[in-house]
Amino acid sequence: MSTAEFAAFSDNAIMFASIVYVLAFLAHLAEWVALRALPVATREPALAGVGADLSGADVATATPPADSSEGGEVRVEMFGRIGLALTVLGCLLHFSGLVSRGLASDPVRVPWGNMYEFTLAGTFGVGVMYLVLMKRHHLRWMGVIVTGFLVVVLMLDQLVLYQDAGPLVPALHSYWLVIHVLAAVIASGAFAVGALALTLFLVKDRATRRGTVRDGGYLSRLPSLEALERVGYRVNAFGFPIWTFAALVAGPIWAEYAWGSYWNWDPKEVWAFITWVIYAAYLHARATAGWKGKAASVIALVGFASLLFNFVGINFFFGSGSQHSYAAPEPAAVVRTLE
């Protein structure tokens, strides 16, 4: 296949991956709708099947559902499995689109040389992170949120950040591109999953305090506040050392190789360090009794906002003054997309 054919294949694979993610989102939505139709007394056992974190509870001794609710539970499980299978299929298509994007360049390269490609890699990281951690941390209840997130981000990536496949700029001709960006992708995927979990924690916590959690609503069917907060903490704690390596080890080494200095006070370097400081503050706060829960979760979400600004804001607002300006889409391309 020619580079043009690989580029076309990549675009089509990402398009079909987006469609499959939409179908996965609808399947998970149908899962929750079917769960809502169950009698209240049978929802907790059903939640154990759709991935609620019931660690510490004796699920095996839970009251078995009544015969009248068995059909509803079968539908819940069926829609959940369909959503999970479609998410796996979407990730496979997503991966094929990433690989073919790298093959669409001459010479062949890794597929994360600009904002469009990094977003493709980052969203793939979110999907894989969710699938890897789903069974261990019982995350299937996040399926509707994760797939919805992937659909929205991929849509924006295609509409606003898209760039044609092409060779890398000279500064990116280094094996540190693979190491540094791959670590950043993994950490970003973990931080995104953690941010989604903590956002749900804060929303449910606020509704619980106000007494507005509606019986049978989405919030009432989520795991406990403690489980939501614990999942967010564990995923962020996993991503933090990887981000540390990406931002404070691999990044400076690559900067010295490309620009002759380990630290250049580049806006993206500075903001990557700010992001690291915020997440370090979150982990420290989470270990302090008075800051657990809501206060620590807010710090984590500020860290994720900082991560997003480092990725998008720096390139758009400081692009001309940053040595990472090669990552931003051409202004004319953005204007054409938005017209």
Image (cartoon, rainbow, N blue to C red):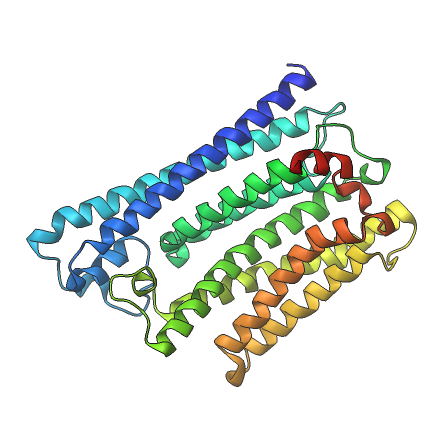
Q: Residue furthest bottom?
A: 290
Residue 110 position (above or below residue 130): above
Residue 197 position (above or below residue 293): above
- The quarter in which the N terminus is drawn is top right
Which residue is painted at 49% across and 35% down in the image? 18
Which residue is painted at 25% across and 61% down in the image? 216
Report the side of 183 relative to 218 (left or right): right
Percent x, y for residue 107? 76, 24
Percent x, y for residue 239? 59, 58
State whether residue 272 appears in this view: yes
- The quarter in which the C terminus is drawn is top right
Report the side of 78 relative to 332 (left or right): left
Residue 75 position by quadrant: top left
State whether residue 226 appears in this view: no
Percent x, y for residue 14? 54, 31
Residue 192 position by quadrant: bottom right
- Counting labels gives 0
Percent x, y for residue 274? 73, 66
Which residue is painted at 63% across and 48% down in the image? 185
Q: Nearer the viewer, residue 168 or 213?
A: 213
Report the side of 182 relative to 42 (left or right): right
Residue 200 position (above or below residue 37): below
